[in-house]
Image (cartoon, rainbow, N blue to C red):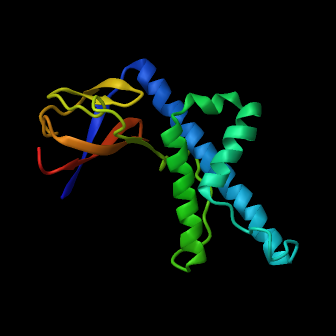
Amino acid sequence: MLKAFKTEIAPTKEQRVKIIRSIGVARFLYNQYIAYNRRLYKMYQRGQLDEKQKHFVTANDFDKYVNHELKIGLPWIDQCGSKTRKKALVNAEQAFRRFFDGVSGFPNFKKKANQDVKLYFPKNNTGDWKIWRHKLMIPTLKQVRLKEFGYLPVGAKVTNGTVAYVAGRFVKGTETSSTH
């Protein structure tokens, strides 16, 4: 069974810059994906695409486009972790799939004013996501101080986590397994 924890972190100045920059890149890629698929969908509605052409691009295909074409003109995209970029595209694809299934409306662009973009950090190595009483190890950010001591279970097995920037504060969500 998984348990989720949400707590506030106190990153250093360099970590703050990296988090804010990465959130910006993730939001940019999400919006680029939405715009790209919106163009294809409108062309499909107008009948400009034949039946063999796709009217929807998957996150994997768009990620290949980002890696081979978009990063050449925009090298700052590499300042964000690859897993975070991929998760932003997967979330955008999920929004489109929900639209096509009739579950939700047409996907909207993410706005900087409505900071609802989160950075996703999976556990790749054994040293990732270690929890101590007053700090934790987040992949690519290294050791980050916690604002609330003793809230997270020390030594718990963390599967993944997110970092968000909400109202000038950095909030971290973590999923841990209950067997620790």
Image side of residue 6 versus residue 91, left or right: left
- Residue 105 placement (x, y as % from top left): 58, 73
- Quarter of the image that includes the N terminus: bottom left
Q: Nearer the viewer, residue 54 or 132?
A: 54
Which residue is depicted at the point 14% across and 39% down? 151
Q: Residue furthest right?
A: 48
Q: Is residue 153 left or right of residue 143?
A: left
Instruction: Depth check: give the residue in front, 70 or 15.
Output: 70
State how many labels appear. Answer: 0
Q: Position of residue 74 (x, y in %)?
A: 72, 32
Q: Is residue 47 left or right of residue 168?
A: right
Please report the residue visible at 63 percent of the width from the left and 60 percent of the height from the top. Answer: 58
Q: Can residue 24 be seen from the camera position used here?
A: yes
In the image, 143 versus 11, the foreground residue is 143
Q: Quadrant of the C terminus?
A: top left
Q: Residue at x 53, y 37 (%)?
A: 82
Query: What x and y, as percent, mark residue 60?
Result: 60, 53
Q: Is residue 48 above or below residue 157?
A: below
- Quadrant of the image occupied by residue 123: top left
Say if 106 sits above or below 135 in the image: below
Residue 114 seen from this side: no
Q: Position of residue 20 (x, y in %)?
A: 50, 32
Q: Please tell me whether residue 52 is drawn above or below residue 2 in the rendered image.
A: below
Quarter of the image holding residue 75? top right
Horizontally, is 134 left or right of 11 in the view? left
Image point (54%, 46%), residue name: 86
